[in-house]
Each structure stands twice: as C-alpha cells, then as structure tokens.
Image (cartoon, helix red, strand yellow):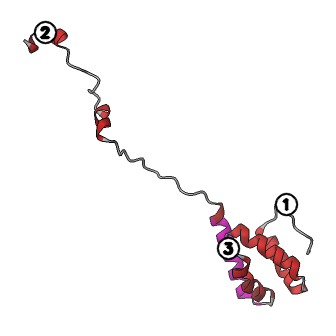
Amino acid sequence: MTDTVTSDEAVALEDLFAQALTALRDGDDEHATALIEKITTACGTTADAERPRFEAAAAGDADAEEELLDDLQMMGALMQVAPAKPQRVFNFAIPERQAEADPLAHIQPNPATLGGLFH
C-alpha cells in the first residue's frame, strides 16, 4: 500500500490520504512527506502547515482524521472551481459613443430632401 505514487497517475485524494497515514504509521517518513506534499500542493496549502494534523490523524485521533480529510476535500474542490464570470455586462460608454447608441443617429437632415423646411 505504500507504493510510490507518481504525478502522472490519477489517484483519488482519499487514497493518497490513506497512503500518507499508513506511511506515517509505518515510520516511512520520506514517503509520507512526499505524499503529504503532493496532497497539500493539490489542495492549495503547505505540507508544513498540515503536517501536525496528519501526524495526529496517524496517531489514531479519529476526529482529527475526519476533520483533516474534510478540510482537504473542500480545499481541493475550491482549487478546481473556475472563477465566476460576471453575469451582467454594464455599458460604460464614453460620451463620444453615446450618439452611436441612438437609433436615429445615422439619419442626418438633408435640406435637398426636406424641401421647404429649410427655406
């Protein structure tokens, strides 16, 4: 269960989490560190910040394990969500362009066609 996980493999967060805890319990610190770094990088946090929580979970604290996994799942989900695009587009037209917005702006009065109005 402590096989090396390469970055090319698609592995579920829960599987990496279980492997990291197993590696910590088995005393394989090098492998555990690599797994924790992979998990925390994917979740947008750091291994140094989460290492104590991993160690508490590996020591058998079920609450710490559940809370850490929930937090990592939430952080991982947030890292995958694209930023929201604005739903409304506001028209901040400059004054020179206001005339273009007028539907009658293209109609120019022509004295030749309007006849007696311009005498």
Q: Secondary structure at mark 1?
A: loop
Q: Tell me the amino acid under the disc marked 1.
A: Glu
Q: Tell me the amino acid under the disc marked 2.
A: Gly
**Residue picked out by circle 1:** 9
Residue 67 magenta-highlighted: yes
Give the percent coordinates (x, y) of residue 83.
56, 57
Picture quadrant of residue 96: top left
What main secondary structure does the magenta stretch of the protein show? helix
**Residue picked out by circle 2:** 115
Instruction: Please name the residue shown 51% across and 53% down the image.
Output: 85
**Circle nearer the N terminus (2, 1):** 1
- Residue farthest toward the left in the current orientation of the protein: 119
Q: CA distance from mark 3 to mark 2?
A: 77 Å
Give the percent coordinates (x, y) of residue 50.
71, 81
Label of residue 84 in the image: none
Picture quadrant of residue 21: bottom right
Q: Secondary structure at mark 2?
A: helix
Q: Tell me the amino acid under the disc marked 3.
A: Thr
Q: Secondary structure at mark 3?
A: loop
Q: Using a 10 Å C-alpha cutoff, classify the residue at mark 1 as few (fewer than 14 neighbours), some (14 to 19) or many (20 or more).
A: few
Instruction: Please name the residue shown 71% across and 86% down the image.
Output: 64
Chain part drawn in magenta: 61-78
Which quadrant of the rendered structure holds the N terminus? bottom right
**Residue picked out by circle 3:** 45
**Circle nearer the N terminus (1, 3):** 1
